[in-house]
Amino acid sequence: MNDEIFAKLCANRKYGDVHPDAIRRAVEDARRRYRKPKDVEKAARERLHGITSAFNGLRGADSVDDLEALLALHASTRERLPLARMDSLYRRVFEITGAPESVLDLACGLNPLYLLRRCGCRVTGVDLSRSCVELLSREPGFTGVWGDLLSEETIPSGRFHIALLFKALPLLERQKAGSAMEIMRRIDAADLIVSFPTRTLGGRGVGMERGYSEWMESHIPANRAVAARFTDENELFYILKEI
Ligand SMILES: C[S@@+](CC[C@H](N)C(=O)[O-])C[C@H]1O[C@@H](n2cnc3c(N)ncnc32)[C@H](O)[C@@H]1O
């Protein structure tokens, strides 16, 4: 039954962009909770919708070159625009980390575009979305991995100056409890910058900042300490330095 549902979801245009490992995992998790195929499929679709709702593929992106227009194609980067705001956000981060040469951006969305074009960094990015990784891969300085961060081998090895996990940990934790800590532990970078949304895309934010602060402060990896914590519009940031 799992194989049939898996094949059906892979063939669905809505999920064609999502890495098959994540589709397989959504089906297997749903299978543990439900017996009837109809219920398994429904639960797997709901999970995949939650993962992919930030943007629905990047149709038409090939003909766009303007940086701001490209960043607006993904809900997470759109929220950080205009570019002047992103400039001041990254200035604030780089004052603490130093200007990075190499960046690892996990569950990256389109964020690497800013770092590649505006800061001249080399960026290695991982995302579940094939169109996202393909679009980034046409940029010089980008190394892309189309993959599921919950699969053991997906986190690129090697040392990076900074690593980013922007608005990703709550999503990953929802996909697999305990995965956020495991992923942070595997990152080899002098500074790890983690962010959380303080409002939903619909604009509600009651208690989100407090909830995510409490979560972060009780989940600091053993090899890191908080170098800075700040909020910027709808986002809470932690800079975690290696100790
Ligand atoms: C909320 S968006 C944040 C994007 C980017 N970090 C930013 O803040 O601009 C979450 C991103 O994580 C990706 N994603 C979700 N689950 C993932 C997983 N298991 N492995 C890899 N990427 C994942 C989604 O495709 C999406 O681009």
Image (cartoon, rainbow, N blue to C red):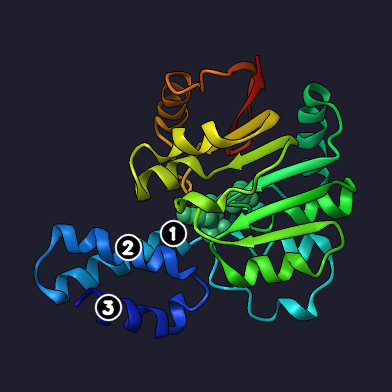
Secondary structure beneath label 3: helix
Of the two numbered discs 2 and 3 in the rendering, the one whose residue sits closer to the viewer = 3
What residue do we see at 27% from left, 78% from top?
3
Residue 243, relative to residue 52: is it above or below?
above
Residue 202 visible in image:
no
Sequence order check: which comes first, mark 2 or mark 3? 3
As measured in the structure, the alpha-carbon distance from the residue carrying label 1 to the one carrying label 3 is 21 Å
Q: Is residue 236 left or right of residue 208?
A: right
Secondary structure beneath label 2: helix
As measured in the structure, the alpha-carbon distance from the residue carrying label 2 to the one carrying label 3 is 12 Å
Q: Is mark 1 within 8 Å of ligand 1?
A: yes
Point out which mark residue 13 bears: none
Point out which mark residue 26 bears: 2
Q: Ligand 1 lies in which image quarter? A: bottom right
Point out which mark residue 51 bears: 1
Mark 3 packing: few (<14 Cα in 10 Å), some, or many (20+)?
A: few
**Amino acid identity at mark 2:** Ala
**Amino acid identity at mark 1:** Ile
* Residue 65 image offset from top left, x and y in percent: 84, 71
Secondary structure beneath label 1: helix
Specify the quadrant of the image occupied by residue 243: top right
Of the two numbered discs 2 and 1 in the rendering, the one whose residue sits closer to the viewer = 2
What residue do we see at 63% from left, 52% from top?
108
* Residue 27 image offset from top left, x and y in percent: 28, 67
Sequence order check: which comes first, mark 1 or mark 3? 3
